[in-house]
Amino acid sequence: EIVLTQSPGTLSLSPGERATLSCRASQSVSSIYLAWYQQKPGQAPRLLIYGASSRATGIPDRFSGSGSGADFTLTISRLEPEDFAVYYCQQFEDSSWTFGQGTKVEIK
Amino acid sequence: QVTLKESGPVLVKPTETLTLTCSVSGFSLNNPRMGVSWIRQPPGKALEWLAHLFSNDEKAYSSSLESRLTISKDASKSQVVLTMTNMDPVDTATYYCTRSHPRAGVAFDIWGQGTMVTVSS
């Protein structure tokens, strides 16, 4: 089973700053099967990025995804107040999905 | 509008079997290449994928929980059912059903609101 490790665990930033979140896989992952989600307290997760770099419907262009192989990145170019949340990466292989442990982006 | 809604017991006792129902609307469970997964999240913890039902009726399960899980569908009722046997307090979590849509690859583009299940005697 592929393990996804996200870093950092918590990111303390101010509105307007750039956020860079990392997701590292225990082995190479097909980029088409790498996704990112945002989750706010008391809410279900929301799909942000699929295929490593494609934004889901309605997602602002300040969110971008990149990477390949075993290293992937979610970047939020300028943090808005509504972006403070927990972010999860996810991968799919051999009819199995796994999630990272999450990165919390909090207000500094 | 596409929606998914989970339903089931709020409280189950240890060793009991949990049965959760996901009622979907706005799309057909027979639609090719779409699927439905169950995912759970213990309080304060990360998401954990449990099981997936593909549109061709093939099923996939988390390797760590496979012996306890069964996923099935009743397309006529637009429902996907998950059963989990031998419940334990560590299974206390919010359980979500989600949809995978081909336009998002195998990612989950629509989520239900989730249903909180507590396992306690």
Image (cartoon, rainbow, N blue to C red):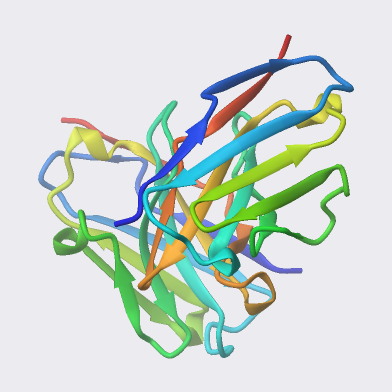
| Quarter-of-image position of residue A34 | bottom right
| Quarter-of-image position of residue A94 | bottom left
Residue B117 appears in view: no
Residue B116 appears in view: yes
Residue B101 location, x and y as percent?
Answer: 62, 74
Reply above or below: B46 against A92. above
Residue B2 location, x and y as percent?
Answer: 70, 68
Reply above or below: A68 against A71. below
Quarter placement of the N terminus of chain B? bottom right
Rendered residue at 17%/59% (across/down)? B68
* Front-lying residue, B79 or A27: A27
Reply above or below: A89 against A93. above
Rendered residue at 44%/43% (across/down)? B47
Residue B32 location, x and y as percent?
Answer: 56, 90
Rendered residue at 59%/69% (across/down)? A32
Q: Is residue B87 left or right of residue A83?
A: left
* Front-lying residue, A37 or B76: A37
Rendered residue at 44%/80% (across/down)? B54
| Quarter-of-image position of residue B67 | bottom left
